[in-house]
C-alpha cells in the first residue's frame, strides 16, 4: 500500500483502495457568514465565522473499497471507520442552503447502532456519493472479493462432512 501524504491519518489494509474523498464545501460557510458578519459589530461574529471555517478545513471524508472514514478535529484528531458490513441504512439530504448552493449530507446508520452513526456533512453531489456507497455495500453483502474465500471454506466443510458420513456408514456396517 502506498500512503498518500494527503491521507496520512488513514491506515488502509493492504488491498484497500480509496474510491472517493472529500471535505465539506466552503460554500457551507455561507450561513455562518450570514450570522457572523452582522454580529461581528458586537464582537461575537468573528468566533462564529472562524469556528465554522476551521471545522470545514479540518474535516475529511473517505470512501474505500472496504468502508467509510471520517476525520475531524481542530486541536486534536478523531478518525471514525464504519465497514460496509456494518452499514444498515444510508440516506442523503439537502436543506435549503444545500439545495441553493449544490451540497448536501449523507447519513449512515449501523446495525445495532442508535440513529445516525456517521454524517458526511456539506459534500458536493451527495446523491452520487450515496450511490457509490450503496454499490459497494451491495457488493460486500453479495460476497465481493471475499466470495472465493467463503466458497473455499464452504467446500472444505462439505468435504469434511462427506468424509464423516462415510466413516459413520462404515462403522454401522461393522456393527
Image (spheres, rainbow, N blue to C red):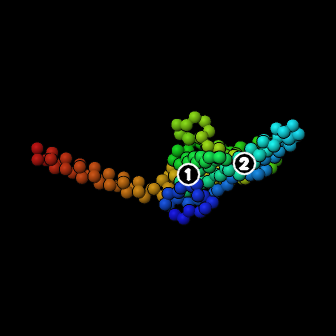
The quadrant where residue 88 appears:
top right
Secondary structure category for the residue under label 2: helix
Point out the residue furthest to the bottom here: 2
Instruction: Check the image and report above or below for 21 versus 113.
Output: below
Marks 2 and 1, how far apart in space?
A: 26 Å
Could you tell me residue 101's position as x and y percent? 80, 50
Question: In the depicted view, which residue is nearer to us: 70 or 144?
Answer: 70
Tell which tag, 2 or 1, sits nearer the viewer: 2
| Residue highlighted by disc 2 | 54
Q: Is residue 36 left or right of residue 174?
A: right
Dot 1: few (<14), some (14–19), or many (≥20) neighbours within 10 Å? many
- The structure residue drawn at horizontal position 41% and vertical position 54%, both measured from the top left corner, is 150
Question: Could you tell me if residue 123 is visible in this image?
Answer: no
| Residue highlighted by disc 1 | 67
Q: Is residue 130 left or right of residue 36?
A: left
First in sequence, mark 2 or 1: give its number.
2
Amino acid at each position: 500500500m502506498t500512503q498518500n501524504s494527503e491521507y496520512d491519518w488513514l491506515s488502509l489494509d493492504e488491498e484497500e483502495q480509496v474510491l472517493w474523498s472529500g471535505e465539506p464545501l466552503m460554500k457551507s460557510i455561507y450561513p455562518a457568514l450570514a450570522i457572523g458578519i452582522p454580529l461581528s459589530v458586537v464582537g461575537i461574529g468573528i468566533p462564529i465565522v472562524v469556528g465554522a471555517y476551521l471545522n470545514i478545513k479540518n474535516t475529511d471524508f473517505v470512501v474505500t473499497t472496504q468502508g467509510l472514514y471520517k476525520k475531524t478535529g481542530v486541536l486534536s484528531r478523531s478518525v471514525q471507520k464504519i465497514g460496509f458490513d456494518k452499514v444498515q441504512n444510508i440516506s442523503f439530504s439537502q436543506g435549503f442552503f444545500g439545495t441553493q448552493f449544490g451540497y448536501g449530507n449523507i447519513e449512515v446508520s449501523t446495525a445495532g447502532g442508535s440513529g445516525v452513526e456517521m454524517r458526511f456533512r456539506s459534500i458536493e453531489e451527495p446523491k452520487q456519493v450515496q450511490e457509490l456507497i450503496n454499490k459497494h455495500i451491495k457488493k460486500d453483502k453479495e460476497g465481493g472479493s471475499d466470495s472465493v474465500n467463503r466458497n473455499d471454506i464452504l467446500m472444505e466443510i462439505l468435504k469434511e462432512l462427506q468424509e464423516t458420513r462415510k466413516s459413520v456408514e462404515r462403522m454401522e456396517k461393522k456393527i
